[in-house]
Image (spheres, coloured by chain):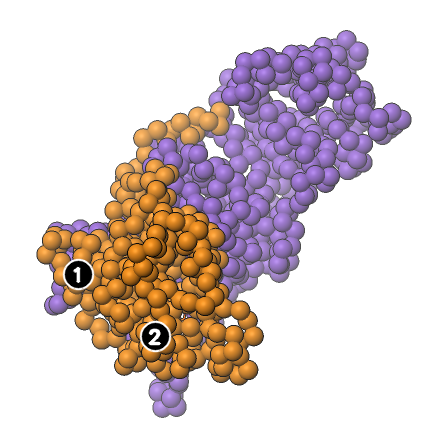
Amino acid sequence: MHDDLNWAIGGEAGDGIASTGKIFAQALSRAGRHVFTSKDFASRIRGGYTAYKVRTSVDRVQSVVDRLDILIALTERTVDENLDELHEGSIIIYDGDRTEFSDFEAPENVTALDVPLKSLAEDAGGAIMRNIVALGAVCAVADFPIENLDESLEKRFGGKGESIVNNNKEAARLGEEYVEDEYTDVTQQYELETTDEDYVLLNGDEAIGMGAIAAGCRFYAGYPITPATDVMEYLTGRIEQFGGHVVQAEDELAAINLALGAARAGARAMTATSGPGIDLMSETFGLVATSETPLVVANVMRSGPSTGMPTKQEQGDLNMMLYGGHGEIPRFIVAPTTVAECFHKTVEAFNLAEKYQLPVYLTADLSLAVTEQTYEPGEFDMDEVEVDRGKIVDEGDISAWQNEKDQFKPHAVTADGVSPRALPGTEGGVHMSTGLEHDELGRRTEDTDVRVEQVDKRYQKVDTAEEQEDFDYREFGDPEADNLVISWGSNEGTLVEALDYLEDDGVDVRVLSVPYIFPRPDLSDDVEAADDVLVVEANATGQFADVVEHDVLDRVKRVNKYDGVDFKADELAADIKETLA
Amino acid sequence: MSSENVRFTDFKSDKQPTWCPGCGDFGTMNGMMKALAQTGNSPDDTFVVAGIGCSGKIGTYMRSYALHGVHGRALPVGTGVKLANPDLEVMVAGGDGDGYSIGAGHFIHAVRRNVDITYVVMDNRIYGLTKGQASPTSRPDFETSTTPEGSKQQPVNPLALSLAAGGSFIAQSFSSDAMRHTEIVQEAIEHDGFSLVNTFSPCVTFNDVDTYDYFRDSLVDLSEDDDYDRHDYDQAKDAILDADKEYMGVLYQNDDSVPYHEAHGVTENMADIPDGAPDGATDLVREFY
Ligand SMILES: Cc1ncc(C[n+]2csc(CCOP(=O)(O)OP(=O)(O)O)c2C)c(N)n1
Ligand code: SF4
């Protein structure tokens, strides 16, 4: 078990909760401590209850726990909201200046420190710094060197000038001194050991944005939606430094079409959205696939259906990504399971999109997207990033892909299902792409043979990828255990920690964490070898469980026809006979 | 292909159009191809985006890099193409249903972005491909299969929409006036910024009101009016909102227009990327220390 400390700041939306939490989390990370943050936010800007929680330990922490050691309460409601998590030894720091706390009674067994946050902040130069005073108070309670906080404050306010930074440092000091003077018995109740380790602290959305730039993505178009907006906010202002551009589109239909245009012009392009946006994009998603355009579409899932609970966790869009859209189209779905993997899988998503010339869903759930975690910087090694643009032809080799009339064949049928691409501007590569069924030249067709050939060509890519790529899973727990637990998305971190509890209770499990939904690793052997098989996922119906079950129960034979013509009796009879044989 | 040697027929594909004989779209397309050749473009460096409809089939009959997209979304695609590679000449074409109904939102936003695209709308005031339903430019009393008693809705005025959204080049042409149509499209291509060319392109099969004769008799060519100054916003506004007359020619042009890619420094071809993380990417990680 971890020697960890759980800290939170809570108040009303608009109270600066998130930025205060982040300042503290960064101070901890700089002090060489591991950090895992979580946010409890309502979907409104002012008035809703909001909290930012930080769990920290010298060991790795990968999940939330329901215990709070130190709580900064900016409102009385903050205490009520967290009552269950307070314990003997918990310390509440509240703003004694606020009238709502005038007859505040602390829960039993909990130490509540009345700290005049507002007046101390005013002494340092302005009431706005009251949260920083509170952080200073925390340093006193947790015996945490306040210099670490100074560095965070410099980073946060450096752009606003030296005097602002100094005022904030002063505010923190006043908070620390106040507690040291007034509450000598609780100072150093906790001890936050520092280490020499160097960590970076970031969340999944940021890691996706960073991965996109690393992969050479130059064009991003998106429409704001929680919890995907952070990807756009990250890229804006950064991607330009690498010759790229972000367009805030008028809606999601425009966003995916903008990205499609950029991709056809030869750029690595991306859009990101969440459930409702994916619904809107699905028509164009089909066009992307049929025109064989490489595109990365990130779906940062939130709870649905419809507008659901925009700020709450869910892994409910799997079926939409797997099956959404009319007709049938191959699409890949890559689902990172950790923040670091958000970076690596984003790079991989771009490579897969270009190698196989199809749309790739890159999906993270809300928890993965918004929780910040510490990592060794080496996990984001830019020297290891490889860019594979797949088959691109230039003027020199274009003739091999032209017909006898010197017309380029963008959808040439090849053994692996992938045809060389000619980027616009390439002499001799002129061609049209379309959402209509087309022949090798990209021209509309209803010819039954060509239709079948092109459908097969597109699906051939899946087989090719399964052969060439390493669609693997990660394994934890007891490799010999009879109980098998399968997980995808952000559940991995929690499961890793849950193993300790299970072990204490004498329950052995083997855990597989799967970062690829389609194509995916074959789990049949693992499933068949186990006694009990559980799939852990944040949805009501078990969408990934269905998929695993489908793979294992491979009993249904199929007779299919997709050339656009009705089944004919004699032909059908022959097909059935052959399939039965 | 060096651009001096390009002829307009080089922009023609070997696919025969399936448009009805006499359809206005033939003339619209010919003018576009001529204008492209006359402005020194080559098929290798041209990208044509089209939506869905009879008009949307144009990408099939022309020869250039092209995308035939989904209904109403051609403008965002064209915008993405242009920003990713500003060296390309980008033309977007479609119908009045495509552009002013399902794609109306994108139209306004493309105008206000002022991306350097030439947008030719083949306005036949009807839905052709779905066989004769009312379009947003149909007259209110026009009877169609879905509006047997008239459309009951005001027609949109695309020129006014463009002006209101800050359009920097607003023009109207008529497909059967080949010379003027070609000239107008040519000016649109040469304009730095978003250019709208609303081209009357009669549907001989489903629209017996907005016919060749109607346009020939009613259109007033502004180029013949010496007092008309296309740079005069108020004059343009009056012409565009004139309820009694319809005009042909360039109704408004802002010569100070700076296209989006130049205004925002998006001038590099984004297709050129290194085969590993770009220089300086490590700084991105450092930010999180
Ligand atoms: C999402 C969607 N809705 C409807 C259609 C059917 N549809 C195809 S063309 C068209 C109208 C085309 O009218 P217009 O843009 O005026 O072009 P025209 O055929 O007259 O040239 C419609 C509604 C479609 N293809 N996609
Ligand atoms: S239906 Fe009308 S618009 Fe379509 S091709 Fe025929 S004439 Fe042209």
Task: Point out the residue furthest to the right here.
Answer: A103
Which sits in the foreground, A294 or A538?
A294
Hey, which quadrant is residue A75 in on the image?
Answer: top right
Which sits in the foreground, A257 or A523?
A257
Image disc number at residue A222: none
According to the picture, the residue beneath numbered tag 1 turns out to be: A401
Task: Decide: few, some or many residues near mark 2? Use Cα within 10 Å; few <14, some 14-19, many ≥20.
Answer: few
Image disc number at residue B217: 2
Q: Is ligand 1 closer than 8 angstroms to the Cβ of mark 1?
A: no
Residue located at (50% from left, 38% from top): A233
Task: Point out the residue furthest to the front here.
Answer: B227
Residue B124: percent from left, percent from top: 38, 73
Front disc: 1 or 2: 2
Q: Classify residue A429 as left or right of residue A155.
A: left
Residue A434: percent from left, percent from top: 33, 65
Q: Can residue B208 be seen?
A: yes
- Pinpoint the chain carrying mark 1: A
Hey, which quadrant is residue A505 in on the image?
Answer: top right
Q: Which chain is orange?
A: B
Quarter of the render that holds ligand 1:
bottom left
Badge count? 2
Q: The N terminus of chain B lies in which quarter of the figure?
A: bottom left
Q: Amino acid at mark 2?
A: Asp
Q: Amino acid at mark 1?
A: Trp
